[in-house]
Amino acid sequence: MGKTRLVDEEYVVLTMHDMKKRVKKICEACIKSGKIETIEIIGPPGVGKSKIVGALATELGMPEIDVRFGHFADSSEMVMKVLNLNHDAINEIVLARFPKVPNCLLRMDEFRHANDDVRKGTYQLLEDKCLGPYTVPAGTVMIGISNGSEDVPLEDLDNGLRDRFKFRVKVVPDFKDWCEYIAAKEYVQGPTIMAFLKYNQDLFFYKTSEGHILLTPRRWESIIQEAGDMELVEMMVHPACFIVLNQFVKKVDMFRNVKKFVSGELKVPDDIGDQWAIYAAIMSDLTVDVKYEDKCFEVFEEKMRGMDADIQCNTQLDVIRYYLTKKKVSLSDVLIKLPAPKKAILGAVVKKYQFAASGLVQTST
């Protein structure tokens, strides 16, 4: 057997969903055992690193403390030495807002920006689990978060600091994870923007050839929140992107005219982008236009006739997810309502999913 050569990525690369699962496992073990662990999470800006960590702390009931190490001018802002009242001894006072109780999550933002003096204190905190008179409480998980090469290049980062994080992971933007997150938020304009991005996934996380990041998952969530007023959205995206997005939003509004579809006045277009607009209209009908809900499957049958098979599958799977999770309808009741042709179309796709009370979960097959 030849020698192993280490090249390229120094970190395991995970989606946000997988990263959360692994960090959760570590946190649960710390809560149970009282052990203190250190984790470094790097990834491009705007993918939701801090948001996921915050959500995980809430889910596990762990108090979350956010300390921005890059804001410290020197280590005296972390621990200050002062004379006692008798002026015969020097006491150390911890100024930083570090965890005071067990089972906390310490989020160490911007630690890569810390100067050399602050890094010395960070070394002690990570390695010895203390800082001057301060001792890290049992069960604490210390998570360093940074933007990776967008912050400080790996080769320029102190190896001593990097090595003091026991676990290290790099996260990448994941469209599927983001869609599930947005769907759970139930934004009114969520279906429209998700459909636009399903057709234009290259815009989900967009970086120019010069390395400038123009669009991120965080930016798209902000756009969803303002998408009811396209004049505001125009100030949030690149002009070329806005032109395409605005055209798509107008088509979604046009395709939501159910009566015209049923009467045959509107036909399913051949253009795939237009068909994704129909998908957005269908999902918008479900979330806000409840007056069609009783006959929704008949309406879907009319709207989906002639659509691309993949788009039909996406639509039906999201309809099923909606009824399972939002309306608490059983899977058997949903499948009974589906038109026979759609059952056949879904056949190949459904095999990749397991249906549970909580919704649809993709399997490994």
Image (cartoon, grey):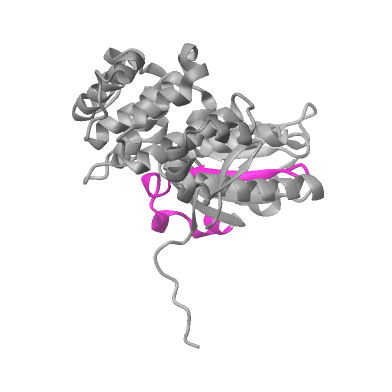
When the figure is inspected, residue 251 is found, relative to residue 110, above or below; the finding is above
Q: Position of residue 25 (x, y in %)?
A: 68, 49
Camera-side residue: 124 or 26? 26
Q: In the current view of this chain or complex, which residue is farthest to the front?
A: 340
* Viewer-proximal residue among 114 and 300: 300
- Give percent across and percent down for residue 95: 65, 31
Q: Is residue 145 magenta?
A: yes
Could you tell me how many numbered marks the image carries?
A: 0
Which quadrant of the figure has residue 272? top left
Residue 247 higher or lower than 128, as above or below = above
Region in magenta: 136-163
Seen from the viewer's position, the closer of residues 104 and 346 is 346
Q: Is residue 174 left or right of residue 169?
A: left
Q: Residue at x 39, y 65 (%)?
A: 8
Residue lying at 38% horizontally and 52% vertically, measured from the top left: 153
- Is residue 322 on the magenta stretch? no
